[in-house]
Image (cartoon, helix red, strand yellow):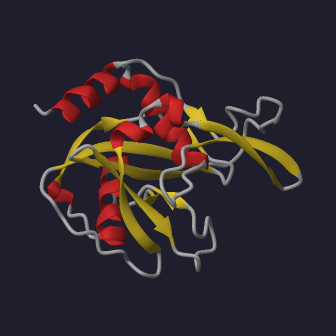
Amino acid sequence: MGNDEARLRAALARPAGESSDYDLNPGLALAPDRPLRDAAVLVAVWQGRVLLTKRSSALKHHPGQIAFPGGKVDAGDDGPEGAALREAWEEVGLAPGNVTVLGRLPVHETVTGYRVTPVLGLVRDAFEAVPQESEVAEAFWVPLAHVTNPANFAIEQREWRGVWRRYYAVPWGPYYIWGATARILRGLADRMGP
């Protein structure tokens, strides 16, 4: 077992609760019966790096934002794992058979009404990401050490629907990683240990 795999499996074994885009905004009142749609993302790790995408600027939701490959869980999917693997295949050409699924990270609720299950997986062999142009503008790798070091995260804020909302950000190079993607990574960082 490689060093990344051992550390990631140890992180998965540590207890952690669900997260949400509301974690840093405790004053926001949430309706208990709010409708949430199930989604899944793939947190794909290969040779000490994590795969991320820059969403197409033409998309209706979250245009131009940095995200994990992922999307809605469809009826034909084999749960969140199946959805995350299917979406990674559709968005960047990562074949499901090239991923060893290690497990699930805690569910994350987004302000846009999704209940996202992050699926943690190891890419077995090198592959060249081929972005699906209608959804993905770019695919790139970020060092795992960078996005699992809590010291690299900042808490920032912006106005959203007339209310100031605080969120995590973990910039890397020209990429501004924030919101749900940064919150999921922060949760993993908190579990990775020294």
Q: Residue furthest front?
A: 173
Instruction: Please state the horizontal and vertical placement of residue 124, each as a whole percent of the image.
Output: 14, 51
Q: Residue at x 20, y 46 (%)?
A: 47
Image coords of residue 77 (percent x, y): 34, 58
Compared across the picture, whether 101 is left or right of 113 comes to left
* Residue at figure coordinates x 54%, y 52% from the top left: 177
Evaluate whether residue 141 shows in this view: yes
Using the image, determine if residue 2 lies above or below residue 136. above
Q: Quadrant of the C terminus?
A: top left
Snapshot quadrant of residue 155 = top right
Please identify the residue farthest to the right as the structure is shown: 162
Q: Quadrant of residue 188?
A: top left
- Say which of 67 and 80 sits in front: 67
Q: Position of residue 38 (x, y in %)?
A: 51, 51
Q: On the picture, is 26 further left or further right than 17?
A: right
Relative to the observer, which residue lies in front, 193 or 81? 193
Question: Is residue 99 shown above or below 135?
Answer: above
Q: Is residue 106 left or right of residue 65?
A: left
Please name the residue shown 60% across and 70% down the image.
Answer: 63
From the top left corner, tell me how far across and down residue 111 is, in percent: 68, 49
Asked whether 149 or 39 is in front, the reply is 149
Residue shown at 71%/42% (left/top)?
156
Answer above or below: position of 168 versus 58: above
- Specify the quadrant that holds the N terminus: top left
Residue 60 in the figure: left or right of residue 2: right
Q: Give the quarter of the image for residue 15.
A: top left
Inspect this view and state whether residue 107 appears: no
Count of marks, rendered view = 0
